[in-house]
Image: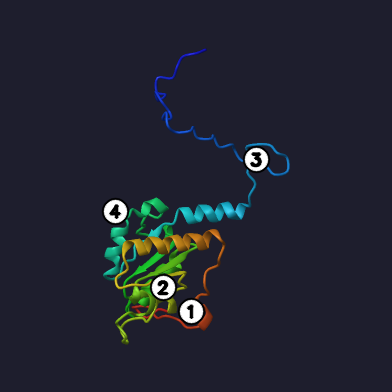
Amino acid sequence: MGVKNPWEPVQSISNTQTPRRRELPVQHGKTGQFGILTTRVSKVIDWGRSSSLWPVSFGLACCAIEMMSASADRFDISRFGAEVFRASPRQADLMIVAGRCSTKMAPVLRQIYDQMPDPKWVIAMGACASCGGVFNNYAIVQGVDKIVPVDVFIPGCPPTPDMLLFGLNELQRKIREGIPNPPDPLKASGLKLVGPIGEEL
């Protein structure tokens, strides 16, 4: 008969359980053959993009502590394929704006967003990034959606790491369903940001 595999378990099922039914491979609807999977290339590409999001390291204030703890072992953002925080915007496709954005930081935020390759997505994490939070004054941008197109808003002050994971799951769902990015606020309004040394962005 052959040599028995020494690594095979002694008993694969218990005496009281019914054996599990072995799942058959995918069966094609028209021909009836097994092992063929039909789909669209765009669906596979969207699935791959949603499963390997690389965030850019862009923590502005206290929400960045919650973003860092989401990548620690208790919440483990790597389960969703987004653990590769990049220091270079040219290697990232997701910007998590964690914290309040001042008017001085707004041109830098936009410049980093412009340096990210397409396709790219933005998550506004926390009340300050979403709408200015408790800082209703001239020094804080009242929502980063005035500077960059935001795909997912995460409320809270501060939002917990599992809220960030939920927002990440919502972004992955949008990518898989092919929902397009919101319109660019600067291109739609025709406004221009002036950088810290005077050049237009």
In this rendering, does residue 24 appear at all? yes
- Compare residues 45 and 173 and report the one nearer the observer: 173
Q: Quadrant of residue 124?
A: bottom left
* Residues at discs 2 and 1 in contact (Cβ within 8 Å): yes
In this rendering, does residue 201 appear at all? no
Q: Position of residue 148 (x, y in %)?
A: 44, 74
Q: Alpha-carbon neighbours of circle 1 within 10 Å: few (<14), some, or many (≥20)?
A: some
The first of marks 4 and 3 along the sequence is 3
Farthest top residue?
Answer: 1
The first of marks 4 and 2 along the sequence is 4
The first of marks 1 and 4 along the sequence is 4
Q: Secondary structure at mark 2?
A: helix
Q: Secondary structure at mark 1?
A: helix
The Cα atoms of the two marked residues, 1 and 4, are separated by: 38 Å
Q: Secondary structure at mark 3?
A: loop
Q: Amino acid at mark 3?
A: Gln
Is 39 on the left or on the right of 50, as rendered?
Answer: right
The Cα atoms of the two marked residues, 2 and 1, are separated by: 10 Å
The Cα atoms of the two marked residues, 3 and 2, are separated by: 48 Å
Q: Amino acid at mark 1?
A: Leu
Which numbered disc covers residue 110? 2
Q: Position of residue 160 (x, y in %)?
A: 31, 65
In the image, residue 26 above or below residue 198 = above
The first of marks 3 and 2 along the sequence is 3
What residue sits right under mark 3 in the picture?
A: 27
